[in-house]
Amino acid sequence: MKARIHVMLKAGVLDPQGKAIAHALGSLGFKGVNEVRQGKVIDLDLAESDPARARDEVEQMCRQLLANTVIESYQIELRP
Amino acid sequence: MKARIHVMLKAGVLDPQGKAIAHALGSLGFKGVNEVRQGKVIDLDLAESDPARARDEVEQMCRQLLANTVIESYQIELRP
């Protein structure tokens, strides 16, 4: 089973990487970019084939390692 | 219009961040993680409302700034 996890800074948390990208896009002549947020995407290939157990396991991974839940939120997508 | 861009290392390019995550998950007792790849996700909020023009613009951004197309591939998703 494959899992894709998005880890983004929570709304309201300053995102300096996003700001830097927005600034660089402006310098390159791209107008009309209102906001940029940058996050991480993590693709896992899991041996577990049961969707419910896989989701539980990935939730644990996010809480323990992949996301800093004080400032980051995560979103899990599973596919077979 | 919103755009979400995934920038991942191409298959075959060594991903040390992914390897580090896989190793750390193993140390935490998570078994059955076959492979981990880490990439970037960039969320853009664009003033452009025409999907075709927005996609063209985002393609240009990816080629010029957001992805290093020698070693990275990108994927664009648009939503209104």
Image (cartoon, coloured by chain):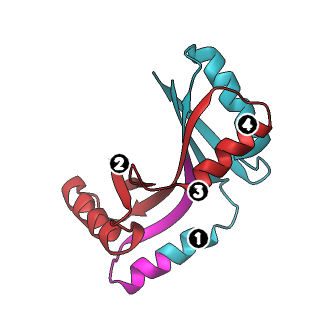
Chain colours: A cyan, B red
- Viewer-nearest of labels 1 and 3? 3
Q: What residue is disc 3 on?
A: B16
Q: What residue is disc 4 on?
A: B26
Circle 1 crowding by C-alpha within 10 Å: few under 14, some 14–19, many from 20:
some
Is residue A40 part of the magenta span, yes or no? Answer: yes
Sequence-wise, the earlier of marks 2 and 3 is 3
Q: Over which residues does the magenta segment extend?
A: A22-41
Label 4 marks a residue whose chain is B
Q: Secondary structure at mark 4?
A: helix
Between A80 and A76, the one nearer to me in the picture: A80
Q: Do labels 1 and 2 touch, CB within 8 Å?
A: no
- Viewer-nearest of labels 2 and 3? 3
- Viewer-nearest of labels 4 and 2? 4
Q: Secondary structure at mark 3?
A: helix
Q: Do labels 3 and 4 touch, CB within 8 Å?
A: no
Residue drawn at (36%, 72%) of the image: A32
Residue drawn at (33%, 49%) of the image: B78
Q: Secondary structure at mark 2?
A: strand
Label 3 marks a residue whose chain is B
Q: Are marks 2 and 3 on the same chain?
A: yes
Label 2 marks a residue whose chain is B
- Viewer-nearest of labels 1 and 4? 4
Q: CA distance from mark 2 to mark 3?
A: 26 Å
Q: What residue is disc 2 on?
A: B77
Q: Position of residue A59 (x, y in %)?
A: 70, 31
Is residue A35 part of the magenta span, yes or no? Answer: yes
Q: CA distance from mark 4 to mark 2?
A: 32 Å
Q: What residue is disc 1 on?
A: A17
Sequence-wise, the earlier of marks 4 and 2 is 4
